[in-house]
Image: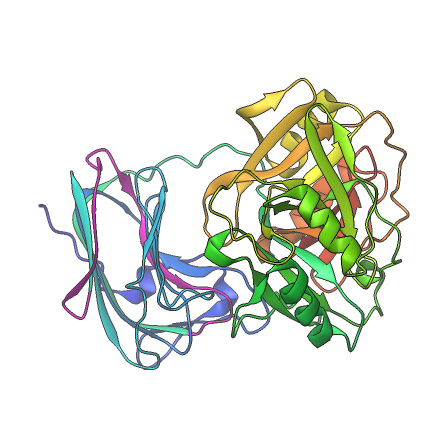
Amino acid sequence: MDTMLEEKLSDLTANIENYVTETNDGLSLYQEHHLDKTYVLTPRAYKVPVRIEAVARTDSSNIRLKYAKGQIIFNWERNHDSLRCGEPSKGGAYNNMNGSIPVDEWNHFVWEVEPDFMRVTVNGTERLFLEGKFSHVKGQAGIGSAFRSKVDVKSFRVAGEETDLPPEPLKPLMFEYDETHISVPEGSLETAIQWYELHLGLEPKPGFGPCLLHPSMKGTLMQFPNERGSLQLITVEEDQEHFRVIREQADHFCFPIKAKDISAAYTYAGENGIRTSRLFEERGETWFHLYDPYGNRLTVTQGKDSDAAPTGSGIYGCDTPIVVVSNLERSVEWYTKVLGLKKSGRLSGARHALMRGNYRHSGGNVNILQLIHGSDCSNSAASRPGVRQYFFVERQNLKKAYQKAQKWSTLISPLEDRSFHFYDPDGNRINIFS
């Protein structure tokens, strides 16, 4: 291996300069108000084999090592034990439970990438070993923080052969999909959590609140057992138009939850005083709408997981969100050009299209939503549904994202407090935050 050592921290390039400062120990990366990923990169790219070393510490979560298309995340914001890995060749996602590191202590990280494997160690202990085909990989190396973690970097070194920087990828501005957010009135969060636990089988994840879109926001992350999906229960003072909810109204956005036996789930709802629609049957599928105590609408569908727990309502997970549109071809083009999503070949057809995009919490390219043709799609942009899909935009791209949305939507909210919303051609609301 030809050796070139990056030892001057001042040579590293910050993606957002205002949040990277020099200290007596080296560099400090910190964003007090935003959730963006802040990082520094080497000015040059390196070929495999390559060895990346860093001495760094975090005050809380998220030390992120970067190389080419990959990253390694320690003290992930959702679970400090989970080591999140995006391998450097194609960014493929892996994880194990070796991700925890002590906070407020200096740790020595080593990431070695060889032609047929990669290894990660912390303080001399192996945390990850992954076989792969990495001989063609080249790219910059870096280190960063995220989700308001303060990361201090004492040293950062790269050993490898230098090469030209890879060309910037030509792609549309990417919106990263976040959780589905369900708004409940002020003062009702605890009773809402109990209702969703009792009737839908969701469990609050300790220590995980909502993304802080507004100073008054409170909430919690609710998860189905066995990693079968999640949603955010939130409450926020509705002093801004973006957060205002007219309950009992809804657009054509459906958040599907899956039942072990849909007939049994429908009966359970009736016996427990839960308001529902009638049972719908179309093209061999059965579903019904279910309303929580605050008028938020969820759509119950027949699940296919044979090992789901049959207790209670039998609801055990959630599916890819559904957006009903009047012109499928037009909507696929719109979501591709505006949000940067791509049509997935899986299960797409004349009346149905799965759209793929970047999921914010894993970095993986996954199915984000389903576009389904509906014959009756009156424009409902005046409604303020309490069940909302949110897309995240990096802070430095927020203004650019807003300008792009202005070109593609005739109705768009003001850009206030790092959030805005606009509408697709059928009046389905797209919510953006940074």
Residue 88 location, x and y as percent? Answer: 30, 44
94 left or right of 246? Answer: left
97 left or right of 233? Answer: left
Residue 404 position by quadrant:
top right
- For the N terminus, give its image quadrant: top left
Q: Residue visible at 76% across and 42% down?
A: 288
Residue 272 seen in this snapshot = yes
Residue 415 seen in this snapshot = no
Q: Is residue 130 magenta?
A: yes
Q: Residue visible at 73% across and 42% down?
A: 405
Residue 289 location, x and y as percent? Answer: 78, 46
Residue 420 position by quadrant:
bottom right
Residue 175 location, x and y as percent? Answer: 60, 45
Q: Which residues are magenta?
A: 122-150
Asked if 43 appears above or below 167 in the picture, the reply is: below
**Quick one: which residue is furthest to the top in this view?**
350
- For the C terminus, give its image quadrant: bottom right
Q: What is the basis of the colouring in this image?
A: rainbow
171 left or right of 419? Answer: left
Q: Is residue 236 magenta?
A: no
Asked if 30 appears above or below 271 in the picture, the reply is: below
Task: Name the residue nearer the viewer: 434 or 156.
Answer: 434
